[in-house]
Amino acid sequence: MMFNHKIQNISNSSPYLKSYETQLFRKGSTVYTKGEKINFIYIILNGEIESFLEKNKTLNSNLILKKGSSLGLMDFILNRNYSKTMLAKKNLSFSTG
């Protein structure tokens, strides 16, 4: 299959994309916090996640993401640590790479 071959070639070019796996997070769990070194790019398979920005030492809700949304992609492209804190709004399953 040509498509699988292309995915394999892409995944071999970056340590972030070498393995694909599913991760589960319970409602209220922290997926990652602002400033952490980027470990994964996440794709939401099921559930919802809420992003938070810190202002005056308080976390403020910024955005809610649902199935099909990606997390960490811009941080990866810009070669920086995670720029937001992400908390599971509902039970979540992700595909990570």
Image (tube, rainbow, N blue to C red):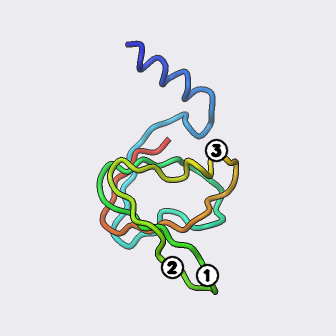
Q: Secondary structure at mark 3?
A: helix
Q: Which residue is mark 2?
A: 60
The disc labelled 1 sits on which kind of residue?
Answer: Lys
Please give the name of the residue rendered at 67% of the width and 57% of the height, measured from the top-left corner.
Answer: 81
Contact? badges 2 and 3 (CB < 8 Å) = no
Residue lying at the far top in this picture: please name it.
Answer: 1
Local packing at callout 3 (Cα closer than 10 Å; few below 14, some 14-19, many 20+) is few
Q: Quadrant of residue 57?
A: bottom right
Classify the position of the N terminus by image quarter. Answer: top left
Contact? badges 1 and 3 (CB < 8 Å) = no
User: Which label sits on residue 82?
Assistant: none
Image position, residue 6 (x, y; %) = 49, 19
Q: Secondary structure at mark 2?
A: strand
* Relative horizontal placement of residue 71, taking residue 25 as reference (left or right): right
Q: Which residue is mark 3?
A: 77
The disc labelled 2 sits on which kind of residue?
Answer: Asn
The disc labelled 3 sits on which kind of residue?
Answer: Ile
Local packing at callout 1 (Cα closer than 10 Å; few below 14, some 14-19, many 20+) is few
Q: CA distance from mark 2 to mark 3?
A: 25 Å
Q: CA distance from mark 2 to mark 1?
A: 7 Å
Q: Which residue is mark 1?
A: 55
Residue lying at the far front in this picture: please name it.
Answer: 62
Contact? badges 2 and 1 (CB < 8 Å) = yes
If you read the primary sequence from the N terminus, does the residue marked by circle 2 or circle 3 appear first? 2
Image position, residue 19 (x, y; %) = 50, 36
Image position, residue 34 (x, y; %) = 61, 67
If you read the primary sequence from the N terminus, does the residue marked by circle 1 or circle 3 appear first? 1
Image position, residue 80 (x, y; %) = 69, 54
Q: Secondary structure at mark 1?
A: strand
Please give the name of the residue rendered at 36% of the width and 56% of the height, measured from the top-left corner.
Answer: 24
